[in-house]
Image (cartoon, rainbow, N blue to C red):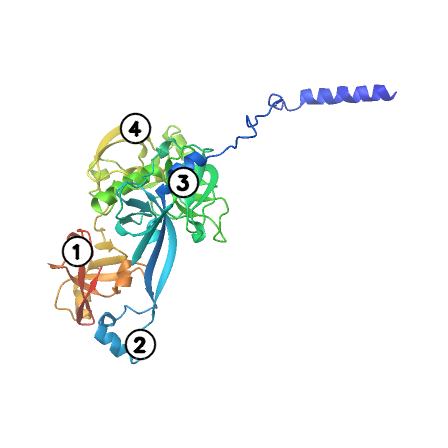
Amino acid sequence: MKKIFLLSLMVAISVYAKDGIGFKYAPQITEREFPTSQNKILSYNNILENVRTSIVNISIKKEISSAGLNANPFYNDPFFREFFRGYGQVPQERIEQSLGSGVVVSKDGYIITNNHVVDGANEIIVSIAGDKKEYAAKLIGKDEKSDLAIIKIDAKELNAVTFFNSDEVKVGDVVFALGNPFGVGETITQGIVSATGRSGMGIVEYEDFIQTDASINPGNSGGALINSAGQLIGINSAIISKSGGNVGIGFAIPSNMVTTVATSLIDNGKYTRAYLGVNISDIDSDMSTLYNNNYGALITGVEENSPAAKAALKRGDLIIAIDDKKITGASELKNTIGAFAPSKEVSVKYLRDKKILTTKVTLGTNEKIASNGELGYKGLKLSTTNKIQKEQKNLSINGVHVIEVDEKSEAFRAGIRKGDVIIQVEDSEIITLDDFKKATEPKGKKRIFLVRKGAIFAVAL
C-alpha cells in the first residue's frame, strides 16, 4: 500500500510540473577549471606593473583665511596690515593641505587630474612611484564643467598612460582603480564596470560617467580607472556615499572626454565648448509613440539668433543623431555637442511631423554674454553699470558691476566682492562686458582695478 501511495505522489508531481512553468535549466556541469599547476598564481601583476608609474600622488597647499580677510583691500598692503594688527582686526591665515592623484599623459610631464583636486592651490607637489624626487607642478588649465585639470612638471621620459576608446567599454569589464586613497600611498583596487553613460547625478555640469564598484575613496580623485589590458578608460572623479567611504558606487570621467578636454587645456589653457542654442528634454514611452517610437532629445525651445535658429530647427523637433551618432536623450546631446569645437559644422538628423529630416548646423561658442546682459568669470557674475547704479555709488566713471561672487571662487579669495565696479584689466579700460571678456582672454594672472566706496585698488586674478 505504501509503494502505491508513493507512486501516485510521483505521478501527481510529474503532471503538475508538466502543466506549470517550464523552467530553463543550464546544462549539467561536471568539470571545474583549476590552475594548471600549484606552482602558478593567477595575477594581473604584469599588467599593473606597466602602468603604476603612470599614476602620481598630488599634494597641495592652499592659503585659507577666515571670513573677511580680503573684504578690505587695504589688508593686502603691509603697512595697513600692521596698523590693523594693533587693533586686532586682521584675521589669521592658515595653510590647508590635501591629497589627490593624477595620471601622466605625456613623456614630458603633462598630468591630468580633477579640477577639485588642485582648485585654489598655492602650491602643487607631485610624487611618482619608484622616484624619491618631489616635483613642483604648474597649473596649465582647468575645466570646472567636467572637473578636469592639467598640471605640468619639469621631467622627461615619463611613463605616459595608454588610452582606450571609452565608447567600447562594456558593463562587466574587469577594471582597476589606481590612486592614493586617504594618503596611505599607492593603492590598487579591483572591480567591474557597473554602468556606462551615467548622467543626471548633479556632480558636474557635463556628465557621462563610467560607474564602477572598484573601491574609490578620498585621495583617489584624479587617479586612473584602467581595464584588464592596462589601458586608461577613465579618470576617477566621485563616489556616492553617506559616510564618505566607499560603498561600491564610484564614477570615472570617460577617456574620450578626457582626451578632448585635455588637448584643449594643453593647447589653449581652457576648454571652450560648442553651442547649439536649444533647450532640450527627454521623452517618455507615451511621447515616443508620436515620433515613430524613436527616442532622442526633444527641442523645447530655440534661442534667438542661435546656430539652431539659423538652421531652422524649432520647438517639437526630436534630434535623433549628430554626425551619424545616435542620440537617445538630452544628456547625450549635451555631451555630444559639448565635445565639438566652436565653428564646427555638424549634421543634425531630427524628426518633425513623423518625417526624418537632416540639416547642417555651424556650431557657435557657449562663451557668450547672456541675453540679460550678464557675464560669468571665475566665480563672478558681472553686468554693465546702469545709470541708477552709477548714481547710487556716486560714480563718474564707467565699468562693469559685480553683482554676485561665489565665496569658493578664485575671485573671492583675491578680494573681489559684490558691489565692486571693475574699471580696468591690465592696461585695458573696461566700459562694457565685451571689453572685459576681450581683456581677460589671454592666459595668466592679471591686474584688475576696482572701485569700492569711492576708493580705487587692484587685485591679481
Amino acid residing under circle 4: Asp
The amino acid beneath tag 1 is Phe
Question: What whole-number distance in Å separates the C-alpha atoms at marks 3 and 4?
Answer: 29 Å
N-terminal of the pair, mark 1 or mark 3, is 3
Could you tell me if the residues under marks 3 and 4 are in contact, i.e. CB atoms within 8 Å? no
Ranked by sequence position, the earlier of labels 1 and 4 is 4
- Badge 1 marks a residue whose secondary structure is helix
Residue underneath mark 4: 324
Circle 1 or circle 3, nearest the eye: 3
- Where disc 3 sits, the SS reads strand
Q: Which class describes the residues within 10 Å of circle 4: few (<14), some (14-19), or many (20+)? A: few
Element type where label 4 sits in the image: loop
Q: CA distance from mark 3 to mark 2?
A: 48 Å
**Pointer 1: what residue?**
436
Label 2 sits on residue: 89
Q: According to the image, label 3 marks what residue?
A: 225
